[in-house]
Image: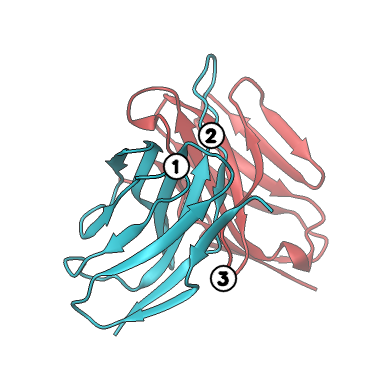
Amino acid sequence: QQQVKQSPQSLIVQKGGISIINCAYENTAFDYFPWYQQFPGKGPALLIAIRPDVSEKKEGRFTISFNKSAKQFSLHIMDSQPGDSATYFCAASGNRGSTLGRLYFGRGTQLTVWP
Amino acid sequence: DGGITQSPKYLFRKEGQNVTLSCEQNLNHDAMYWYRQDPGQGLRLIYYSQIVNDFQKGDIAEGYSVSREKKESFPLTVTSAQKNPTAFYLCASSIPETSSPYSYNEQFFGPGTRLTVL
């Protein structure tokens, strides 16, 4: 059972456009929601993360929007660039029970930004 | 430089052989993790360890084994019981924090080992 559901599986965006990737969860114990970026043949790296006490977090061109009542969060990449072409993973962790001490990852979105 | 080392980058083995993947970190992190990555499957957790001499099964532990004798090292053995071992394996470490009010678990990943079983 996938604890974090991510869509779309792949995304093609024109340079300068906005890339949007969505994730949804059910477990209310989750309280930390990071996004990871992975380039081919490399390990993932943390891009940006949010906690449920805020509805939005922005770092440069990357923004997380968080909707606690809907149990959804999304990554927005403004002014998308070819260098943003990578696989993006959302994830979640919590502070009790089976959510403690580990991350649950979505299946990933392969983003291609063409010039 | 602090970081996570995985070796080798590419590994080939014959079917039926056990193989051990290396993971070393010098970040002084308490927790370490092993993931398997297959196309379209995301990152699936195999085993994780919060502290030396202790580890827990993840979501797909069958056919794998681990040990955690030192804080810096968390080797993964892919046994002959693993039915489909060909995959990209990623090791990670973190200092998970669960102090009130929220958890925090930034994981740092190694470069991965691509295992091919022939």
Name the residue beneath numbered marker 1.
B71
Residue for point 40% across, 51% down? B74
Q: Amino acid at mark 1?
A: Lys
Residue for point 25% across, 58% down? B64
Q: Are marks 3 and 1 on the same chain?
A: no
Name the residue beneath numbered marker 2.
B95
Q: Quadrant of residue A67?
A: top right
Q: Position of residue B17 (x, y in %)?
A: 22, 76
The chain letter under disc 1 is B
Q: Colour of chain A?
A: red
Q: In which quadrant will I find the C terminus of chain B?
A: bottom left
Q: CA distance from mark 3 to mark 2?
A: 25 Å
Q: Are marks 1 and 2 in contact (CB under 8 Å)?
A: no
Question: Which mark is in front, 3 or 2?
Answer: 2
Q: Amino acid at mark 2?
A: Ile
Q: Position of residue B115 (x, y in %)?
A: 38, 74
SS for tag 3? loop
Q: Position of residue A63 (x, y in %)?
A: 72, 41
Question: Which mark is in front, 1 or 2?
Answer: 1
Q: Position of residue B100 (x, y in %)?
A: 53, 14
Q: Is residue A110 above or below residue A37?
A: below
From the viewer's side, name the closer residue of A8 and B80.
B80
The answer to whether B92 appears left or right of A83 in the picture is left
Residue for point 80% across, 48% down? A61
* Dot label at residue A41: 3
Q: Quadrant of residue B49?
A: top left
* Dot label at residue B19: none
Q: Amino acid at mark 3?
A: Gly
Q: Are marks 3 and 2 on the same chain?
A: no
SS for tag 2? loop
Q: Quadrant of residue B69?
A: top left
Q: Colour of chain B?
A: cyan
